[in-house]
Image: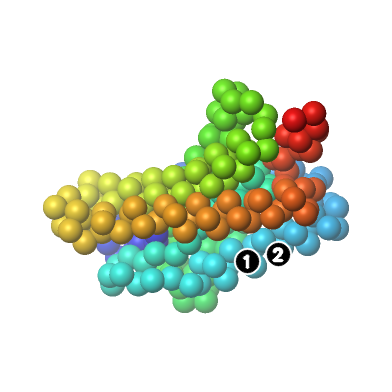
Amino acid sequence: MELSAELFSAILHGPAWVIFLLALLAALRMACWRRLSNKEQFNVFLGTCVVLILLWLVRAQVEQYWSYHLLGVTAVTLMFGWSLAIIATTIALTAVTFNGGGDWQGLALNGLLVGVLPVTLTQFSLVLVHSLLPRNFFVYVLLNAFLIGGLAATLCGYAAALLLATSGVYTWFQLEQELLPFFPLMFLPEALINGWIITMLVLYRPAWVGSFSDVLYLKGK
């Protein structure tokens, strides 16, 4: 879900830019650039950015000031990790904004909503699942890809709604009538697209999924 910058004052946009740029700088500094020195991995990364751009250009304009589109960032995070996923979503959002699918003033705020937040939730969930549950192929696909993909997108929608309510743009009653009923519908398509992508990749191109290991998830299972 992306929001129009017109809904918020400069008081909010300032901190949003600071947080977004700090996250981007951290991602640039911690990114595994050595991985992208491999020609195949570099091409996969660029292809992923293009897919994200195309996916985000297909959107539903529900109201004048907000629109919905599939995120797909859970799959990107599982493929490349937190840092490169932040960079990929920033590239995609910049390209979509340049193409007229958004506004520059709200780039940081939307970057947090559709990029930094779901990517961070996915990475945190991946670490948590690895720590608490067995390293199993079905656990990896069903939880990390399907379930977390749907939950991350849904939680980002609620974060946007909370932002609208606390900023005084809309009352919570208005959001319950006009916005919140759409959120349960966001779960299934996000779960399916992320789960399907990761399932296909770990079966046919496991080297493209950085968080997956044949030794950990398949050998001896």
Q: CA distance from mark 1 to mark 2?
A: 6 Å
Specify the quadrant of the image occupied by residue 214. top right
| Residue 124 quadrant | top right
Residue 76 is tagged as none
Percent x, y of residue 32: 74, 43
Quadrant of the rendering where the C terminus is positioned: top right
Question: Looking at this view, is 150 or 115 the one in front?
Answer: 150
Local SS, label 1: helix
Q: Residue 157 location, x and y as percent? A: 36, 52
| Residue 131 against residue 13 in the figure, above or below | above
Secondary structure under badge 2? Answer: helix
Work out whether residue 42 can be spotted: yes
* Label tally: 2
Residue 75 position in % (x across, y down): 61, 51
Residue at x 79% of width, y 48% of height = 207
Q: Is residue 112 left or right of residue 40?
A: left
Vertical side of 196 occupied by 155: above or below: above
The structure's colour scheme is rainbow
What residue lies at 85% left-to-right and 53% top-to-bottom? 38
Q: Residues within 10 Å of mark 2 (few under 14, many from 20)?
A: few
Please rate how many residues cluster around mark 1, counting C-alpha atoms within 10 Å: few if below 14, some from 14 to 19, many from 20: some
Q: What is the three-letter code of the residue carrying label 2?
A: Gly
Horizontal side, residue 81 vs residue 62: left or right: right
Asked if disc 1 and disc 2 are in contact, CB closer than 8 Å, the reply is: yes
In which quadrant is the N terminus drawn?
bottom left
With 71 as the anchor, is 170 left or right in this view?
left
Residue beneath the point at 63% across and 56% down: 197
Judging by the rendered image, the residue that carries numbered circle 1 is 51
Residue matched to label 2:
47
